[in-house]
Amino acid sequence: AGALALALLDPTPAALRALCLERAAQALEARSHALVALLVREAGKTFAAGLGEVREAVDFCRYYAARLRAGDLIGSAPLGPVVAISPWNFPLAIFCGQIVAALAAGNPVIAKPAEQTPLIADQAVALLHEAGIPRGVLQCLPGPGATVGAALVADARVAAVMFTGSTEVATAIHRVLADRGDVPLIAETGGLNAMIVDSTALPEQVVTDVIASAFDSAGQRCSALRLLCLQDEIATRVLELLDGALGELRIGPPENFATDIGPVIDAAAHLQLDAYVDALRADGHCVMTRSLPDVCTDGHFVMPTVIELRTPTELQREVFGPVLHVVRFALHDLDALLDALGRSGYGLTRGIQSRVDSTVERILGHGGVGNVYVNRNMIGAVVGVQAFGGEGLSGTGPKAGGPLLLRRLVRRAPGLSLPGQCAPADLDTLDAWLTAGAGGVVDDAARARLRVRVAACRAATLWGAVLDLPGPTGERNTWRVHPRGMVLGLAEAVEDAVHQLAAALATGNRLAVPAAAAGWLSALPEALRGCVALRPSDGFEPWQAALLAGAEGRVAAWRRQLAAQPGPLRPILVADPDYVLERLLVERCVTVNTAATGGNAGLMGLGES
């Protein structure tokens, strides 16, 4: 209380918020034993998983406090009330991560925990109140998602929604919010996560990483390995070792310190998983598993199971539990395998096991995945080290524990300077075309305004940004931004369409415009015509983001139409007065175990320094 009173004398509200988050981190650490016990009791976590979750919650508090103290949000304004809807599989870490991010940005929060884990949520909120967060700023509202969650999302007073859960629910939230304009939705929605193993990988290491990736927390992690892709030459050996490793796992009550894998969350999950395995066994698939031990007679236990598939496309949905699918592939079919994985539409995590750098780069080049792990397991992302989040059907971004999340939770985020960022040369070409008269497609006043917009795009773009994130010795973590691809431009005026082109060019994207816009496109320099595609008049596809400009009613109609489209949750932007360019980029984080392919040569010089 004394420290909080002193902080109130600080004229910078961000410093007070940072202090409260730091105090929350201390409170979580001080109560770690009680919190782990509750995680074991209510969520079925093992002690090791519970300790890891408390650590992650603490990390979120300290990370966002550090961002505040670094001045990341200077000059910004909060959005308003934020609804945070969290899942049962990480009822403390994700619950706290959402809340403290919204609080750090200065927003009041209504936290809606999962129906299965309200006690953990209640304890976490009590600790945050104890740390100095006023009760009027943070409230916990437990209850069913279909009633409580739906009512919160539909309330016109809600300024943003943070959600972790299924793609179907996230899509429903997206469509509700689209009717109210630009209400931010930050969603993380799981994936069909694959690990690709070539014949150069060390089988013993592969099996160790597969066991952790697929079966830790009973496979109830959004990042968990779902599809193991083994090159033909190594497949049989890896499966033999994997079968032996399954026999060594201890399944049982989570309160037993010897337990490796505890129960799944509830009876419904138990029944669905058993039915799924039975259906694939009946369909003639090879199923590798063991019988449950007697200690698992009471409870919702599912034995870790490995199922061999004929093709990767047989895996159509996320199976949320300790079930691993395996496919074999020939090296000459690697690109076809990657294309098949890409067509699933999901892009959360991917593993690569190879000691050939060119193979690793070849797989990385296919992109479309938010977090890639090379020669290590695919779980346990550390806040600020492996900024976490997917793309496509796996989420909207920005990444949790990354440099862009807090900026999505405020108005007027300040400028951001990152290593490597620069404006693409195409933006200079557009500016030169405007200076030279723009082919007469807009008048002089419009050209002057557009040159101001181009300058704003040049100053705001994060295109090319790269961050080397911290990590332990023997591990390299790299964060980059990448263009989304095709950006849909819908505008009623030529001036607005050119502004949209500037936004697309500044982020390395292409712009898709209605065929009726062919008139002004013909006036573009030859070098820019390849950056624009004509869209058929009878549809919107393809697009990965949309830029809207026009009368309010027209923009609202477009927004509703686009939100109703099937597929991933894609950003729909309106200029105010400029587009938020970072939303036209996706973040990807690559983690490499540098010790796995012969050691870290940098260690050899430590004795000389």
Image: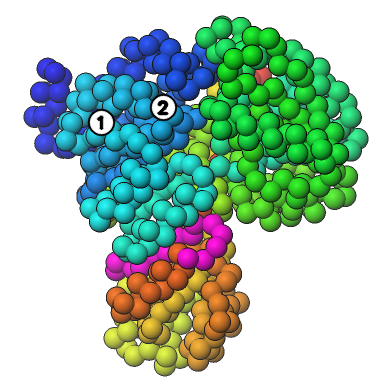
Q: Residue at x 73, y 27 (%)?
A: 305
Placement of the N terminus among the 4 image quadrants: top left
Q: Amino acid at mark 2?
A: Thr
Q: Is residue 511 left or right of residue 373?
A: left
Nearer to us in this view, 92 or 579: 92
The range drawn in magenta is 564-582
x and y, in percent, of residue 564 in the image: 47, 65
x and y, in percent, of residue 358 in the image: 77, 44
Task: Please name the residue that numbered disc 1 is placed on.
Answer: 18
Q: Residue at x 74, y 53 (%)?
A: 340
Question: Relative to 321, is 459 above or below?
Answer: below
Image coloring type: rainbow
- The total number of labels drawn is 2
Task: Give me the disc on residue 117.
Answer: 2
Q: Residue at x 68, y 31 (%)?
A: 274
Element carrying mark 2: loop
| Res 405 quadrant in image | top left
Element carrying mark 1: helix
* Among numbered discs 2 and 1, the one appearing first in the sequence: 1
